[in-house]
Amino acid sequence: MMMPMPAQKPPSKIFHATMLVTRAEEWWIEAATADEAQALLAAGAGHRTGLGERVHVEVEAVLEDSGV
């Protein structure tokens, strides 16, 4: 008795994605007051202590590799 041929799985493709990732990071700054510290941090001053944890990830676009 002949066994049926298994269905062939289509070949895998490569896809690239543009992702929007939000992280919760810890930063520090030297300042005289909390208001001054907040203003300095908002202006880009300060020092990051670590990369932090991802708190939100959203796929913006998925593109299929053209194979070129």
Image (spheres, rainbow, N blue to C red):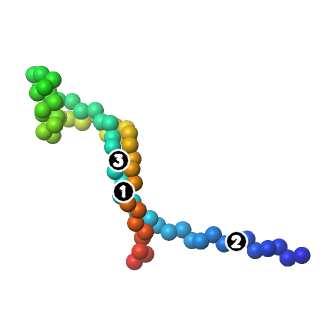
Indicate which disc, 2 or 1, sits on the residue closer to the N terminus: 2
Left or right: residue 36 compared with residue 23:
left
The answer to whether marks 2 and 1 mark residues whose Cβ atoms lie closer than 8 Å is no
Q: Who's the residue at 15% across and 40% down the image?
A: 44
Q: Which residue is mark 3?
A: 21
- At label 2, which amino acid type do we have? Ala
In the figure, 67 relative to 26: above or below? below
The answer to whether marks 2 and 3 mark residues whose Cβ atoms lie closer than 8 Å is no
What is the crowding at mark 1: few (fewer than 14 residues within 10 Å), some, or many (at least 20)? few
Q: Who's the residue at 89% across and 76% down the image?
A: 1
Q: Nearer the viewer, mark 3 or mark 1?
A: 1
Q: Position of residue 18 (x, y in %)?
A: 35, 58
What is the crowding at mark 2: few (fewer than 14 residues within 10 Å), some, or many (at least 20)? few
Q: Which residue is mark 2?
A: 7
What is the crowding at mark 3: few (fewer than 14 residues within 10 Å), some, or many (at least 20)? few
Q: Compute the Cα span from label 2 to label 3.
A: 38 Å
Q: Who's the residue at 28% across and 32% down the image?
A: 26
Indicate which disc, 2 or 3, sits on the residue closer to the N terminus: 2
Residue farthest to the right?
A: 1
Label annotation for residue 60: 1
In the figure, 58 relative to 44: above or below? below
